[in-house]
Amino acid sequence: MGVGEVTLSSTIAEQANLERVPEGVAVPAETFRYRMEDRPACWLTGVVGSGPHANGGEWVRELWARFLERADELPEGLDWSAFVSPCHGRETEFTCYLGFAGESPVPASDLPDGFVSILIPAHRYGVATVSGYQADVTAVYGDLPRWIEGQGAATDREILWLELYRERPRPIGERIDLEIWLPLR
C-alpha cells in the first residue's frame, strides 16, 4: 500500500486540542503518500516538556503557546521553514520538543532561558505527508506502522519520532499540513 485516502493532523496537535473538526462538517478524505527516507542528523533548538497522556491537551497547548510567543528570541542560523517536533512516548507519559532545526548546536550562552539544543541523529524513517483535520490522525498513526511492516521494516519506538509543520499551527477547526516521520530499526 503506497497511497491511501485519509486526512491527518498531528498527535501533538491532538494532545493540545489545536484543531477539531466542527460538528456537522463533512471531512473529505485527502490523498497522502507514504515513503521511506533517510534524514541526516541535525540539531533542534527550542523548548521541551514532559507530562502524562491524561492531561497532555493542557500541557502541550501551553508548550506550543510558550514556544510561539518566544520563537523570535532564537538566534540566527536555524531553518525557519518548518516547525519540528520530536516526540517520545512511554506507557503513561510522553516528551515533546518544539523548535527549529539547524546544522550545529546553539551554544548554551546563546540560548534564551528555558530553551534547549539537542542532537537528532541521522535515521531512516517511514514518512507520511498529509493534510486534514484532527479526527484523522489516529488513522494515519495506525496505518503508517502497518505500511512500514509491509515494506519489510519495523518502527523503532526507542527513537524520537518527528512531526514537521511547514506552517504555523492553525486555530481549532482549521486544516493542518504536516509530515509524520516514524523511525525505523
Image: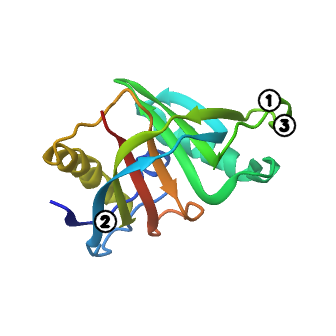
Choose between 11 and 82: the one closer to the eye: 82
Q: Secondary structure at mark 3?
A: helix
> At numbered mark 2, what does the secondary structure look like: helix, strand or loop?
loop
Query: Do the numbered discs 3 and 1 sit on residues whose CB atoms are within 8 Å?
Result: yes
Percent x, y of residue 107:
79, 33
The residue under label 3 is 110
Q: Position of residue 168 (x, y in %)?
A: 60, 62
Image position, residue 27 (x, y; %)? 29, 72
68 sits to left or right of 121: right
Amino acid on which the number 3 mark rests in the picture: Asp
Dot 2 amino acid type: Thr
Residue contact between numbered discs 3 and 2, judged by CB atoms under 8 Å: no
Asked if the residue at tag 1 contacts the one at tag 2, i.e. Cβ–Cβ closer than 8 Å, the answer is: no
Residue found 24% across the figure and 54% down from its top: 139
Quarter of the picture holding the C terminus: top left
Q: Which residue is pictured at 59% across the width and 33% down the height?
A: 119
In screen coordinates, is 55 left or right of 118? left
